Structures are given as structure tokens and as C-alpha cells.
Image (cartoon, helix red, strand yellow):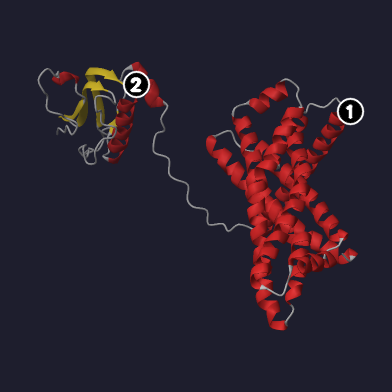
Amino acid sequence: MTSDPSHIPAFVGDKQDERPTWAVEQSGADAVLVVRGHWTIDDGAVLALPDRALPFASVTAGRDAPALHVDVRDLGQWDSSLVSFLWTTKQAAAKSGLTFDTSSLPVEVARLFALLPAAPTEPAPPSSKRPNIFVVTGGAALGMVDEVGAVVELGAQTAQGSLRALAGHGGMRFRDLMANIFDAGPSALIIVSVVNFLIGAILAFVGAVQLRKFAADAYVANLVGIACVRELSAVMTAIIMAGRTGGAYAARISTMLGNEEIDALRVFGIPISSYILLPSVLSLMLMMPLLYLYGCLVSMIGGYVVCAGMLPDVTGTGYIHQMLGAVNVQQFEFGFAKSIVFAVLIGLTSCRIGLKAGRSAADVGSAATSAVVTGIVGVIALDAIFAVIADVIGI
């Protein structure tokens, strides 16, 4: 019985004996696999023996099982494709009742062949065990606690670095701080202006539509002022900074990690908390309160523009007077304090996510995405806590 599925007709100038071919020949009760030519991938070698290529052995009582011998006298160059072909041939021989004889194989081929398992490994059966909800929930809770502890430790190291920097012994460079301040402050003015202006305009529009029904047009200024100063300007500015600056921090640090710049700093004994984290967190702490105050002003302007267009009875002086009467200094102090806490949260979590990211290009994008999501969710969660605190202290 012969078979040669890898045979390719020779062209002019080709050497037929260099092409990888195989054939199965009968030799009494045994079979012989004849391998000829160069068995390399570039030469188009077959990687697996086709099904039903070997004859089924007929075992006679009192006699050993027939064998499948390998004839490699005409074998040329070879690579791992030959080993793969012989391994599949061994599996086919076992199914046909033949023993596979490797005594005639070259020493190098026999050594590689001996490294392979006797039979293909069966895939692991799918686990039918249902996950324990307590184990999953407990693991998630412990992981969250561990991350909170890591962020707190990172904050403590950054605070120590700030004290050393104030004493003139820190590793923070002034130009790094100024660059981060510019990125977190003046560079964000446009988007902060647009978002807060639209927030104030939307609040004024919704308030004007509803309050006009009760002849309470003048109280639109109260609505815009209290909502923006106490809640929306701080929250929306923090969300903007989480998506814009927090993601940039995480991507930058994870890129430095992938380029082994973080490892180089650690080798030279330069503290990461002072050299990288402190300028990032400190710039956010300095700029976020200022951006909050700027956002409050822009949102009030947005509310005024809508009121001037929809409420002819509300004058500019009346709008300002009504707003100043509704918003007191405590509201600004409360929003100012919230913006500082939001800045610390965004800076520390973004830097933490960047430091624990992987070293591939895909990990940079994952770190930036995770930093944005964590920052936004964290800001909203903290704002809920601040709302409860404000109610307790009576603000």
C-alpha cells in the first residue's frame, strides 16, 4: 500500500529526490514507512499522517504484533515537521494495531521524538463545580481592602515626600511640578469652561420652565447658584480631571514601567513617591480648587445667559443679588474642601493603577481606562459621603 499526498510534480530544473515524500509499503506481516527528500517547512513537508493511511494489522496467535518500520535512507534535510509527522504516524500505527519501530531513525530525530508524550493529552473536562458566592465575594472584598491600603500607603509616602521637599531634601524637581500644574490647570480651562457653562445653562433652563408655572422666576438664580457651588461644579470638574488628567497619569506611569524607567529610578535609589507621584498629586491639589471656583463662575454665567433670554422680568442686577443671597461662604468652603479631596483621590488612584500595570502596549490602554473609571466612580461615591456629612453638620 502506497500513498504520497505531498507529491508535487517536478518542474524544469527541480530535483525530484529533494521533495518531501512518503510511502507505506508492505513487508510480510510488517509495514515500512519510506521517507524521502528534504523534510522542512519551506519544502512543504506534511505535518500529519492522513487518516486510514496505514493497513490494519492481522495478528496471528502466538506471534508478536506486526511492526511499522521507518526507512530514512533517502532522507535529506529535516526540521521539526518530520518529528511532527512521525508522531502522528505513531498514533495512527497504534490505532491500526502496529508497533512503531524507531530504531532506524537518526539520533537527533530519536532524541526529539523521545521528548514527546506517548499519546495526545486529553483536554481537561469543564469544571461543573459552581463558584461559592461567599468565596468570590470575600476575595473581592479582600482585594478591595488591599487596594485601599496600598493607596493609603502611597498617600503617606507622598505626604512624607512633600515634607522633605519643603525642607529642601526631597527628590521632586520644580520644573516637573510646573509642567504638571500647566497640564492640570491652564490646559484644562477650555473643557472646564464648556462643561460648566452648559451645566449652568441646563439648570437655568429646567428651572425656568418649572418655576415659571408658579411665578417664581427669580428663584432660578438660587437653583443655579446652590446646585453649582455646592455640588455640580466640584463634581463635574473632578470628573473632567479624572478623564483627562487621571488617565494621562496612569498611561504615563505605565509607559515608564514598560520602558523600565521606573526600575532604573529604583536602582539609583530615587524615591518614586517624590520624583513622580508628588508632582502629579500636588499639581492636582493646587489646580482643582481653582478650577472649581472658575467652574462656579462660568456656570453662573451660563445660568444668567439663559435667564436673560427666557425670563425678561429677571434683570442682571436682580440675578446677581438673588444668587448672592442664596449662596453663602460656607457653600464655597464646602465645595472647596471637596475639590481638594477629589484631587487627592484622582491623583493617588491614577498613579497606583499606573504602577501596578503590566509592561505591554495593551496594558497602557488598560491602565488609562481603569484610571478613568476608578476616578469617576470614586468621585461620585465621595460626593455621596460628603452629602451625608453636609446634612449632619447642617450646611
Q: Which circle's residue, 2 or 1, is located before the other in the chain?
A: 2
* Crowd rating for badge 1 (residues with CA inside 10 Å; few <14, some 14–19, many 20+): few
Image quadrant in which you'd find residue 276: top right
Residue 2 vertical placement versus 151 (above, below)? above
Residue 374 can be seen, yes or no = no
Residue 143 vertical placement versus 253 (above, below)? below
Picture quarter with the C terminus? bottom right
* Image coords of residue 22 (percent x, y): 20, 28
Extreme residue toward the bottom, this view: 214
Q: Secondary structure at mark 1?
A: loop
Q: Secondary structure at mark 2?
A: helix
* Crowd rating for badge 2 (residues with CA inside 10 Å; few <14, some 14–19, many 20+): some
Mark 1 — residue? 167
Q: Amino acid at mark 2?
A: Val
Residue 372 can be seen, yes or no = yes
Mark 2 — residue? 109
* Image coords of residue 174 (percent x, y): 77, 28
Q: Amino acid at mark 1?
A: Ala
Picture quarter with the N terminus? top left
Q: Residue at x 11, y 23 (%)?
A: 11
For the residue pair 288 and 193, the one nearer the viewer reads as 193
* Image coords of residue 344 (percent x, y): 77, 45
